[in-house]
Amino acid sequence: MPRILIVDDEPSILSVLGTLLKAQSHEVTPARSGEAALNLLKTQSFDLMISDIRMGSMDGMQLLQHVRRAHPGLAVIMLTAFGTVDTAVEAMKEGAFDYVTKPFKVDELLITVQRALQYQNLVSENQALKEELAGRYQFENIVSESPGMRKVCEMIERVAPTDTTVLVLGESGTGKELVAKAIHAHSTRKLQNFLPINCAALPEPLLESEMFGHAKGAFTGASSHKVGLFEAANGGTIFLDEIGSMPLSIQAKLLRVLQDKEIRRVGSNENVPINVRVLAATNDRLENLIAQGKFREDLFYRFSVITIEIPPLRARPEDILPLIKHILRRELGKDKPLPVLAPEAQRILETYTWPGNVRELENAIRHALTFAGSNEITKEVLPAKVVDACASGKGGAAPVASEDFRGKSLKAFLRTKEQEYLLQIINSMGGDKEKAAKALHISLATLYRKIPANE
């Protein structure tokens, strides 16, 4: 329930506002002076303050200045008599969210309160995101034992300080948003907003409104102006996930935004300048969508100046055990001891192909922690799907070698194990050796040279 502080030296105004806002399920606290309001702010937290400008010894402008210094994230709405609008405008320059003239219209007041609370929620979420970005998305928290992920981290480090548009490629579950957040966290915009939007999650009209905002009356239900994510992210970064799902009509408008650095709200004729870095991600091959007429080629070239491709987990087995340790530490906290990984459980986790990538591995570890009865993760507490796939030889489980290597050289042992792994990757690619070679970051000729002749 949002908590609202009302400050006015007229008891009738406090009574009316309190009744209106309580009817909207808000918790209301009244204060009859600026001094009383400051005392309340010392011991209580509020989501919004509504203050009259003309009061006794401390007027609303003085109160606003105190609040801006001590509580810079608190949204403030100023109440002003019709003849002092200039003072209210000055208050907005000092940091007030908006103003309402007295005598006020109930609908206007409630809409302004709703907008202010939405703004406050956005500020709170963004602050939480900044704190998350300050820790979780540092390079040391991106598991990169494999050459493929080390290359990803090198790319992040190089592109982050620039304002270049970046396209992040990768299968579902590989961590594309993680990479986008890491780019933002290491950029010059890191103290500003990072706002993500999933282009596949909203129908076309809602997606356009969410991205660019809309004017009052633009369509049925548009009872007030709405600020879109591009405006809200001004000075920061916007992340367009699953950009391959974006409708063609919005692609054209996005291209114009990237070219002109300005947006136009739905139903408005006014262009609004913006300063936003755009990052995008997709698990589709945009070249294929272009050939099908589903994605604009000119927009593709706008995004593909710099691409970062995240390899699937099956192509970087070196990262599996470090990822497991990282996930366990994140789930259990820094103080609890990590459970022991039983040898059979470790073999299964290392040899499964993880079609759902890191997201599936995270779910598997959470499953294991839920059912582990002791400080050990065994085969029995792993998801049945993973265990069964390895037992049947499907899903990438490399067969346990039955050959006795006693008396044979290390070179012979490593050669056999290498062939087993290569066959595992080929099997996970449905027998497509060209795809397997790309996943392994070797040439097709090298792959043919390394695998057994009858394969």
Image: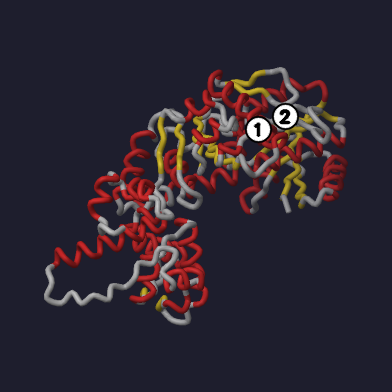
Q: Is residue 128 above or below residue 8?
A: below
The structure residue drawn at horizontal position 49% and vertical position 52%, both measured from the top left corner, is 173
**Which element is circle 1 on?**
loop
Q: Which mark is residue 228?
A: 1
> How many numbered callouts?
2
Residue that protrudes farthest toward the front in the picture? 454
Q: Which residue is mark 2?
A: 214
Q: Amino acid at mark 2?
A: His
Horizontal side of 19 relative to 170 (left or right) equals right
Horizontal side of 124 relative to 267 (left or right) equals left
Q: Is residue 332 above or below residue 7?
A: below
Callout 2 touching callout 1 (CB < 8 Å): yes
- The picture quadrant where one finds residue 322 is bottom left
The structure residue drawn at horizontal position 63% and vertical position 29%, both measured from the top left corner, is 248
Q: Is residue 300 visible?
A: yes
Q: Amino acid at mark 1?
A: Gly
